[in-house]
Each structure stands twice: as C-alpha cells, then as structure tokens.
Image (cartoon, grey):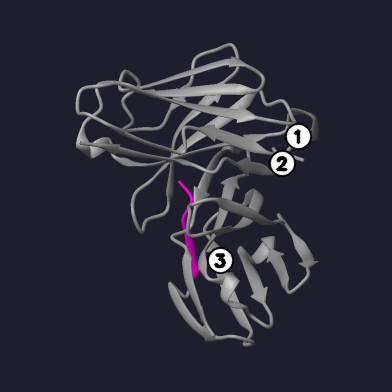
Amino acid sequence: GAVVSQHPSRVICKSGTSVKIECRSLDFQATTMFWYRQFPKQSLMLMATSNEGSKATYEQGVEKDKFLINHASLTLSTLTVTSAHPEDSSFYICSARDLFRLTSEGGEQFFGPGTRLTVL
Amino acid sequence: GIQVEQSPPDLILQEGANSTLRCNFSDSVNNLQWFHQNPWGQLINLFYIPSGTKQNGRLSATTVATERYSLLYISSSQTTDSGVYFCAVDRKYNFNKFYFGSGTKLNVKP
C-alpha cells in the first residue's frame, strides 16, 4: 500500500514551453501533497505544499506564477512549470501522507518516483 | 528552520561489512524518516521512526529524540545497498515542512 506515482518520468522540452507533471496517490487519499526539487548531487528542497480544494503554500523563494500547483482531488496534484528555462532543469519529486493514517504529529510521507525535467 | 546534519557524507564499504549512519537535528521533531535513494532517483522508505528502535531485515534504526539524533545500521552490506541515504524530519507543531539532511553516499564494493 501507500503508492505514489508520477507522470511523466522524464521530459525534455524547449525553452519557453510549459510542462505539466502529475502526482497521484494510487491506493490512498491525501488532502495534502508536497512538491520537492532536487539538483544533481544535492538534497531535496521543499517547493510547495499542495492542499486539496485550496491554494498551494509556496516556500520562500519559489515563484508561484512560475510553478503552478493544482490539487483537484484527494488523489491528484499537478505541478506546471510555466515558460520553462534551462535553469528549471531538475528532478521534481512529490510526496503525500495517507489521510486515514494521519496522526496528531502528521505521519509517514510516501514519495513518488520523480520526474526528470530537461529544458533545452 | 531546522538543521539536519548527516554523517559521514561518503562511505565506501566492502561487501559484508557493517556500517552506522548518523543524523543529527537541531530542534524537537514530530516525524523522522530514513530513505534510500536508488540510482534512478526513487526514494525508498526505510523507516518511519520518530523515536525508539525498529528493525527490518539487515537494517535497523534508532532515534533518541531527547538527544536529537538518529542512527541507521546496515549489517552484512550488499552491493544493492549502494546509493544515497537521507534522513528527513519535520518540526514539532509544523509537520507539513519536511527538512532533508544532505545525505550519506554509500558505495558497497564486491
């Protein structure tokens, strides 16, 4: 149980185009999903918290107009990188907590396999 | 924010050896998890361990929350254990922000 999928796994696009990445919880529901970014040989940095039915919460320094997040249902969050540029090339990973396994302290997070974005 | 420090940053082992990875954190936490990131980037959940000790096969982990550290033990290492090991924590009263350590890169040689 607790499987998170991402699509696509890899995408190459031209500078100036927009790219949409989907994150799905396959066997559980999640009111909150998280989007991370990882540069080569570095750790993961939280970009934003995606809330079902409401606006996402962005971390300091992350442009909300650049990285559009939509959490349309309890099993799907999407991240759209708008007008992508080479500096947006990175590994994007989503995670989620199982709504029905939450504790007062939050609970375990489950991560998707990641999406490798290359902007030419 | 909370500081998460992992040591050692790099570790080379001969197959069959044992190792201990450490994670120190600077503030009280709600949740602590250990992950193994495989060569394709997938984060594999190893342990969800805010406190106490857990074991899963050749791996075990201990978190001493009052002293703000966690240890991951790998026994009888195998080449498939190679990769990067991360610990991640979130702060008490703000469990929606997960802070990752910088990782330990493990290379197990045959």
Q: Which residues are magenta?
A: B1-7
**x, y percent for residue A48:** 46, 30
**x, y percent for residue B80:** 59, 71
Residue at image coords 48%, 50%: B2
Q: Is residue A83 above or below residue B35?
A: above
Judging from the image, mark 3 belongs to the subunit labelled: B
Residue for badge 1: A102
Residue at image coords 21%, 31%: A85
Q: Determine the image quadrant of residue A14.
A: top left
**x, y percent for residue B55:** 79, 68
Residue B23: numbered disc: 3
Where, quadrant-wise, is the C terminus of chain B in this rendering? bottom right
**SS assignment at label 3:** strand
Total number of numbered labels?
3
- Say whether residue A2 is left or right of residue A11: right
How far, Cα to Cα, is label 2 from label 1?
5 Å
The kind of residue tagged 1 is Leu
How far, Cα to Cα, is label 2 from label 3?
19 Å
Residue for badge 2: A107
Viewer-side residue, B102 vs A78: A78
Judging from the image, mark 1 belongs to the subunit labelled: A
